[in-house]
Image (tube, rainbow, N blue to C red):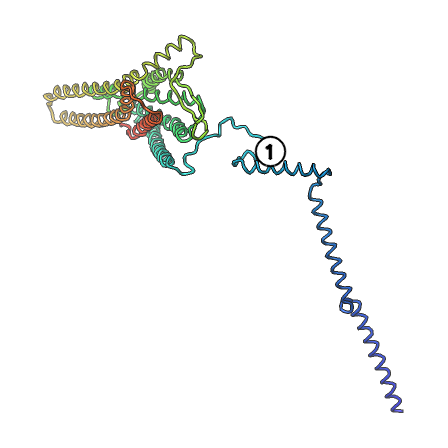
Amino acid sequence: MVPLVLLVLVLIGTLETGQTVAEENSLLKDSSPSIHNPASALRTSRTEDLEMERSSVSHLEKQHRRVPRGSGKDRKQKHKEHQVLHNQRLSRPFDPEGYFTTPRVFNGSLLVHNPLYPVTDDSYGAYAVMLLSLVVFAVGVVGNLAVMCIVWHNYYLKNTWNCVLASMAFWDFIVLFFCLPVVIFNELTKRRLMGDLSCRLVPYVEVTSLGVFTFSLCALSIDRFHRLTGAPSRPLQQQQVESCGSIVAKLSVVWFGSLLLAIPELLLWQMDSEVSAVSGLPVDSCARRPAAALPEAVYSLVLTYHEARMWWSFGCFFCLPLLFSLACRLLTNHMVEENLRQTRPSSSSSSSSSSSSLKKKKKRGLEEQMSRMLTMLTIVYGLCCLPEHAWSIGLTYASLQISKNTLALLALIGQFLMFARARGNAHANPLR
């Protein structure tokens, strides 16, 4: 019985082992058929690669345009035309307008010369002009604004002397703030800001500033004479403050006369534009030439002013302020000396002598301040205006052949001398 039981157990174990092996084989077949069949796996991968290539080709064909059908000759002709156009585009210089579909018309407004880049021999002069103009602009604007603010915000500085200084500072500020950028832009780019309008306004503002300075020097000389020679009937602190009506009346005479004398400058200047033969860019310049469209009477007056402009400017805006200031100074000094001679013997008491000595000291200090300031303003004005008058008169009567570049350089030097004069007047301190 024992052998029979053992035999049955062996048969049962064999059957279970066979069943387990069969189940494992079926699982392997289902999960990885490529292991049992390598050829089928290779065929499947190649089929997938072909399908991917076909899909990419079809996608590229959809992106490209369809070429219209035609004969071979038509295609060759079109190919030649495209090749010729491509060669023409390559041979052309770089043009930014070609990259825009909408045509843009500049009318010459953006065609300017840039001397700063690329750097050449002329660039150093352009950089020097720009640096000098920035220094003059910054110092002059800040100084003139300081003078105007000091006089405006201090009650005890509101008198004729200080208000005339503030008026001069105001016009110098206008010259630096408006005229200097226009002149420097024209010098660097050879174009004119605001066109013909700036050709008329810049000379008008400059001549008005000269008139204001001329009449202001005369007014300062007269005010110095009245202060030092007149008998003070009020305390010194009350004398320093004047009524608004008196100050406005004096300033209105100075301003109205200056604006009126500068009116012919508006009718005298015109802008000329030409194309440079070197760079091919337009060049703007302002010329003194009366417009032919003016009425006959006005045209004759402007033409007379144009012919006499040199001597008129020299006499009215140079000789008049210098001679008037010198004459007033000599007369003031003579009157002060006469007053001192008359007041010397009258010294009766110690109190009266001490009070008179204090008044004399104050008068002497006031006279020294006024004298120094008037002398400084007169010297600065004479040094800045004399070179321009000298070479204008010399070139007119010397009959020398001067090139356009030399004339342009002299005109630029004259402009910078005017700007330097406007900057130098900013150092005039108000008198208290």
- Residue 31 lies, with reference to residue 118, above or below; the image says below
- Residue 43 lies, with reference to residue 76, above or below; the image says below
Count the marks: 1
Quadrant, the N terminus: bottom right
Query: Which image quadrant for residue 190?
Result: top left
Residue furthest to the top = 297
Q: Secondary structure at mark 1?
A: loop
Residue 175 vs residue 381: left or right? right
Residue 119 vs residue 368: left or right? right
Q: Give how far across and how far down residue 362 sits, in percent.
A: 20, 27
Name the residue beneath numbered marker 1: 101
- Residue 99 lies, with reference to residue 237, above or below; the image says below
Inspect the image, locate mark 1, and give the three-letter code of the amino acid beneath it: Thr
- Residue 326 lies, with reference to residue 3, above or below; the image says above
How many residues crowd mark 1 within 10 Å: few (<14), some (14–19), many (20+)? few
Q: Give how far across and how far down residue 285 sits, in percent.
A: 41, 24
The answer to whether residue 261 is seen in the rendering is: yes
